[in-house]
Amino acid sequence: MDEPPSARTRNTGASAAGSGGYDDPIGDLLPYASVDSNWWYWIAAPIPLFVLSLVGGALFFVGFLFDVFLTGGILTVGAMVVFGGLAALVGLVCSVLFPIAVYVDARALSDAPESTWSPDPVLYGLVALAGVVVTAFTVSVPFGLYYLYRRHEAVGTP
């Protein structure tokens, strides 16, 4: 089992309060993780992807300007279709997993007795979801950096 002892004995559901003092509306739909789990990797993933998208956009623009004069831009457009499709697939996976990872990791931190920080998983999960849906990762990057900093201060990782 991947769930801590407190999660196995806890009542789950919309009206049951978790051991961290929060209502757990998700219950058993998502896995229970420990503080040592690697869910925080998915919280950190949008940060380098955002930077790579900025660099890739700039490189595409410069490459397209040079390629227009050589081949009419067909090489750059072909490369954009291939790499753009791969980037869209990676972005879709991160869009789905980022709010889930924030919720699962915040629930683990909130339930852990050794953690000095007890984030509300519902609040942090909703902020992560809004950051992905409304701002397309623009707010998710600073939010992820803040969350990972607070997590590091509380438990030492990342």
Image (cartoon, rainbow, N blue to C red):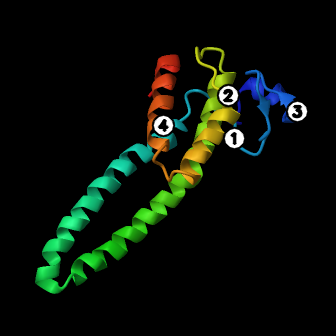
Q: Callout 2: helix, strand or loop?
A: loop
Is the residue marked by circle 1 packed among few (<14), some (14-19), or many (20+) residues within 10 Å? some
* Residue of label 2: 120
In the picture, the disc for residue 144 is 4
Question: What residue sits 70% from the left and 35% below the top?
Answer: 122
Counting from the top left corner in percent of width and height, residue 146 is at 47, 30
Is the residue marked by circle 3 packed among few (<14), some (14-19), or many (20+) residues within 10 Å? few
Mark 2 or mark 4: which comes first in sequence?
2
Query: Disc 3 versus disc 2: distance between alpha carbons?
Result: 15 Å
Considering depth in this image, is 130 or 15 the residue closer to the camera? 130
Query: Disc 3 versus disc 4: distance between alpha carbons?
Result: 29 Å
Considering depth in this image, is 137 or 113 the residue closer to the camera? 137
Q: Is residue 145 left or right of residue 35?
A: left
Counting from the top left corner in percent of width and height, residue 136 is at 50, 53
Mark 1 or mark 2: which comes first in sequence?
1
Mark 1 or mark 3: which comes first in sequence?
3
Query: Disc 1 versus disc 3: distance between alpha carbons?
Result: 19 Å
* Residue of label 1: 31
Q: Is residue 49 left or right of residue 23?
A: left
Identify the image quadrant of the N terminus. top right
Question: What residue sits 44% from the left and 41% below the top?
Answer: 141
Considering depth in this image, is 107 or 8 the residue closer to the camera? 107
Q: Callout 3: helix, strand or loop?
A: strand
In the picture, the disc for residue 15 is 3
Question: What residue sits 60% from the left and 46% below the top?
Answer: 130
Q: Is residue 11 visible?
A: no
Instruction: Please determine whether, in this image, residue 129 is positioned above or below residue 79.
Output: above
